[in-house]
Amino acid sequence: MKSKALLGILGGMGTAAGIQFQKVFFEICHANGIKGDQNYPEWVYFNASLAPDRTDAILNIGPSPIDYLVQSLKRLQAAGADHVVVICNTAHSFREPIFNEVPLTWIDLQKETATAIKRAGYSRVALISTEGILKSGLFRKAIAPLETQYIEATPGSQTQNKLTKSIYDSAIGIKNTGSTVSADAVGLLQEVVDEFDVDAIIAGCTELSLARPLLKLNAVWIDPLEIAAQACLDYWRRNANVEKPQI
């Protein structure tokens, strides 16, 4: 039996999002005609749950996750992974120093999302995300070359505070309520998405993907998890190394 490329999935940031990605990847594989046990991609998943919070690190209020993520990726590399997808948008802020230590090619969530936006021709998009992503500017930079109006919340604003609470709050935040998204978190997110008069909304934090089925949207939901899952399938089908990132 011919063995195709082995995909590494680095999750655990948070754990629910990593599990969700595997479900999304499975569904996209099936939607693309894959069925039967032996026809699905092989992948190895590492739940990197001990990674220090990426947003805290970017805001200089917590330790860096770099050393831990380097060690986690080395474990995926040792397991035979030759390509990885990192299920945390904010972790991409540390991609360059991590890649210097572990030269596994990442599927770039922000670059792939920008490509999808260009392909769809959206004229006005909004980002909802962690404050760490806002400070990093990763989506802003990826979308800047497009003829697309880009909107994001202002750090420290009421809108961003609602997003932060819906993700991180110890009582209602998506990171803390297990497999259920609380009604309070959904309410805060609904208030945020209702603020934007746009063609599409980018879910710039992987936890937000879990809330999508519970929201009423007047815009297209752009989910980097779904986009990355399709990119993973495309890579696996090519069974060849993609171009190394320019860093």
Image (cartoon, rainbow, N blue to C red):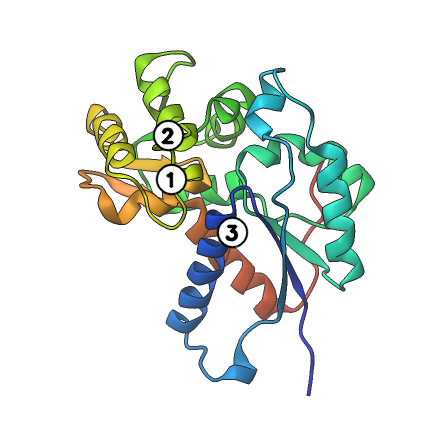
Q: Residue furthest top?
A: 156
User: Looking at the image, which residue is at 31% across and 35% down?
Assistant: 201
Q: Residues within 10 Å of mark 3 (few under 14, many from 20)?
A: many
Pick whichever of labels 3 and 2 is earlier in the sequence: 3
State the residue position of label 1. Answer: 208
State the residue position of label 3. Answer: 18
User: Looking at the image, which residue is at 64% across and 46% down?
Assistant: 48
Left or right of residue 97: residue 8: left
User: Alpha-carbon distance for marks 3 and 2?
Assistant: 19 Å
- Whether label 1 touches label 2, CB < 8 Å: yes
Q: Residue furthest bottom?
A: 1
Which quadrant of the view contains residue 217? top left
- Which of the numbered marks, if any, corresponds to residue 128? 2
User: Alpha-carbon distance for marks 1 and 2?
Assistant: 8 Å
Horizontal and vertical percent for residue 22? 49, 60
Kind of residue sitting beneath label 3 = Gly
Give the quarter of the figure containing the C terminus. top right
Which structural element holds mark 3? helix
Kind of residue sitting beneath label 2 = Ile
Which structural element holds mark 2? strand
Q: Is residue 149 visible?
A: no
Horizontal and vertical percent for residue 24? 42, 59
User: Looking at the image, which residue is at 52% across and 48% down?
Assistant: 15
User: Looking at the image, which residue is at 72% across and 47% down?
Assistant: 72
Is residue 132 positioned above or below 218 on the image? above
Left or right of residue 154: residue 62: right
